[in-house]
Amino acid sequence: MRKPVPQRHSRIRHYAAIVTLVAVAACSGSDSAGNPSTPSTVSVTTVAPTTAPPPTTTLAPTTTTLPPTTTLPRSADELAGARVVCSYPEVDVPADLLARLRAGKAAGVLWYGENLPNAATAVRNAAAIQQAAAAAPNPAPAIIATDQEGGAVRRIPGPPEASAQALAALGTAAIRDQGKASATALRQWGINVNLAPVADVGRTGSFLMAQARSFGTDPAAVGADVVAFVTGLRDGGVAATLKHFPGLGAAVTNTDLASSVVDVPADILRSTDLAPFAAGIGARTDIVMISSAKYPALDSVPAVVSRVIVHDVLRGQLAFNGVVISDAFDTDAVAAVGPIASTAVAAANAGVDVFIARHAPPCAQIQEALANAITDGRIPRADAEAAYARVMQLRRGLPGD
């Protein structure tokens, strides 16, 4: 029996308290210079214990005293490499990608259908990927991710065969079972991260509802279904990903295909769209995927480059301390912001930890852009170290077999 993904995230406050806090960020936006407003802070007082602990005695070593250990600073290449998960079009893993993994210039791979002709091939490739990651300067299991939502979005045969919309009719117990069964199947193919479930609350006429990818239109019910799927995945030893924050359920256009604007009032976003994400975070989800759509009620720029949305709302107000991942970064929706290199730096400064793309070249482009920005100070080193720590914490809890 393989151990499940460890619990790493604290439970958040009751949702009613969360949405009240989110209101602060939703009303803040950016100032006239384009700088995000600063969220309010809460002072915490630490009370000293009334009784001092008894003194301890340290015995002198009988052999030569070892010098104090020091941690060498990570190179900019490593700090940036922890933030890219690479795709490739071939069946077998390219040699240059394995080299990037060994050098610490990539954190793992994202597999699509063309990479997964059968389980035996996947297991062989996964072994090569994990062997390369184990040889990196800071070895840890590589992220091997795919989209196994169910229904039309399913990369391997097996559960969940039903769409999210169909699963919702079965109830949370069945959804949890399907989440665990899908984790078992994914593990058999060497996959340890599922880019699911969709936590978006659907609307009539939205592309997600047309594809049956949303659990439904009621935020409380969607939240319960999200918790069930996340719990099932965790019980099966696979990391879950909530997507697409702060909610893509009202979008008519798929951001993989074109730019999209979610023109929903802030109060509706708070009461409807954020609720399932709050529930999933409370269930200790490991990863949250940021939407590439615009949310004018929250900020003037797409969510993936919005510090208001990523840092203030997701990190600050919803208290998520896991890994924040982009949606596909080589899309027209992201290209509308600017060149991929400068947009990646902007997204990193907004709070995005990991970048994915549908094609191979962006992996190196993004890693190099981030490394250069860390070197010249456009990305503060402290922020880069914090993102690196979050990603490595996730990876060390993943199965590497």
Image: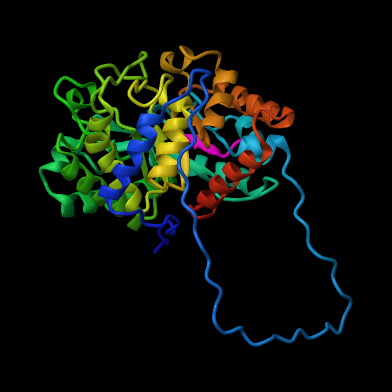
Q: Position of residue 181 (x, y in %)?
A: 27, 51
Q: Residue at x 25, y 32 (%)?
A: 267
Which image quarter: residue 193?
A: top left
Vertical placement of residue 71 versus 264, above or below: below
Residue 253 position in % (x across, y down): 28, 16
Which residue sits at x=23%, y=21%?
A: 207
Of 277 and 363, the residue lying toward us: 277
Q: From the image, which quarter does the N terminus lie in?
A: bottom left
Which range of residues does the magenta coloring cover?
106-110
Q: Is residue 209 above or below residue 122?
A: above
Please state the total of marks drawn on the protein image. 0
In the picture, measured across the screen, residue 190 lies left or right of residue 367, that is left
Which residue is depicted at the point 25% across and 25% down?
265
Vertical relation: 22 (above or below) 185: above
Examine the structure image and report whether residue 275 is included in the region drawn in magenta: no
> Residue at 28% across / 53% down in the picture?
14
Task: Using the image as rendered, state which of residue 80 and residue 343 is in the foreground.
Answer: 343
Image location of residue 366, percent across then percent down: 59, 25
Percent x, y of residue 68: 81, 65
Name the magenta segment's main secondary structure.
strand
